[in-house]
Image (cartoon, rainbow, N blue to C red):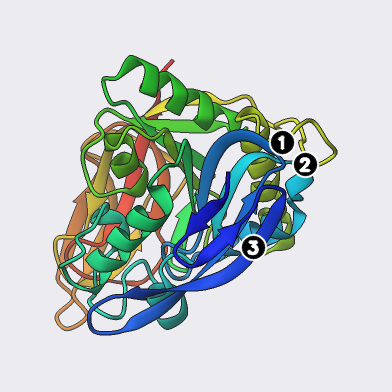
Amino acid sequence: MTLTIGTLRAEPGRKTRGVLPADLGTTTVEVPLILVNGARPGPRVVITGGVHGGEFVGVDATTRLAGLLEPEEVAGQVVICPVSNPPAVYGGRLNISPLDGVNINRVFPGDPDGGPTDRMAAWLFAHLLDGADAYVDLHSGGIDQHLLDFVGYRRTGDTELDARNRALAHAVGYERVIFGTSPEGGNSHAAANRQGIPAILVETGQLGDRHPDTVGRLLDALHRILHHLGVIGASAHVKPPTARPRDWIWAGEAASETTGLWYPDAVTGDDVTEGQTIGRIIDPVDGTEHKVTANATGTIIYGMNGLTVRPGTELAAIATPHN
């Protein structure tokens, strides 16, 4: 079966590289794609990197994966998009687009008639997710974020889909597998779930890391995922996980309610209790202090490292072991 996305085509047993234009209303951007059409039937797996700017590990790992996958060794089809949100990746260094200040991972599946970021999200879902059997979205701690490696998935209420989500998440081989209790919201994997597609989010590295060891850790995880899905067989690339996966559940978060300078008292990896002060936001003009407290008990999985914050800035996300 020929793999076709837009004007790009890959016959069975072939690999095709190219770019497709995405009309965002105010501008048109070029989205890079690598299509790997295996020599044998199997699932279609979509892997995206570069959904956010300033998160480099996923961009690097997907690019390397595209070079390593040989169609004659693949069962099924692998669609790789190393830079899924070009305006944010090339024009910004944070998780919002410089075109409109919108975080794309809050608006999936997007709106083809909306603003630039909504259109970008809609383009990705229309071109890449249509016909997918599994979806893996790669992220990392950006240049302003401390983060512990983890995998995210959602519980949807659909027993079969939930089991496939969990199995896919555990196949990554990371210690922390954190689930949300609803498929609602604008995250990529949640929106894919609402279309019946098993999907996970993988977070690897922090502070804009691009070290080869960090990229290698994610690349190992991608090979384990593809092996789990039956896309590739056992090989030297499929390495055993270094940690036993354990289910966690999101418990709470803290966001800035004001503009100012962020001074954390608790950082990523710290255990906190509900009501505990985890940091202060200082007004740079008059020195007024605004205390920030944890709204749940658990471990800080990722936290803000940047100094300057504004209303709505995520300061900390808290999770707790589920079993």
Numbered circle sitting on residue 232: 1
Task: Give the percent coordinates (x, y) of residue 259.
Answer: 18, 72
Find residue 118 and report its horizontal and vertical position in percent.
Answer: 23, 64
Of 1 and 278, which appears nearest the observer?
1
Q: Callout 3: 10 Å neighbours few (<14), some, many (20+)?
A: some
Judge whether residue 257 can be spotted in this image. Answer: yes
The amino acid type found where label 2 is placed reads Glu
Relative side of 172 to 278, left or right: right
Q: Residue drawn at (76%, 54%), measured in percent from left and top?
A: 68
* Residue 16 - label: 3
Name the quarter where the N terminus is drawn.
Answer: top right
Q: Position of residue 161 (x, y in %)?
A: 37, 23
- Secondary structure beneath dot 1 equals loop
Tag 2: Cα neighbours inside 10 Å, few (<14), some, or many (≥20)?
some
Question: Vertically, is 156 above or below 71?
Answer: above
Disc nearer the start of the sequence (2/3)? 3
Q: Position of residue 96 (x, y in %)?
A: 31, 70
Q: Of tags 1 and 3, which is closer to the observer? A: 3
Marks 1 and 2: in contact by CB < 8 Å? yes
Foreground of the two, 45 or 221: 45
Q: Which mark is residue 127?
A: none
Give the image quarter of residue 275: top left
Residue drawn at (38%, 17%) of the image: 160
Q: Quadrant of the C terminus?
A: top left
Give the number of marks.
Answer: 3
In 3D space, how far apart are the residues under numbered discs 2 and 3 (Cα atoms)? 15 Å
Viewer-side label of 2, 1: 2
Residue at the spot 48% in from the left edge and 37% down from the top edge: 134
The residue that appears at 76% across and 50% down in the rendered structure is: 70
Residue picked out by circle 2: 73
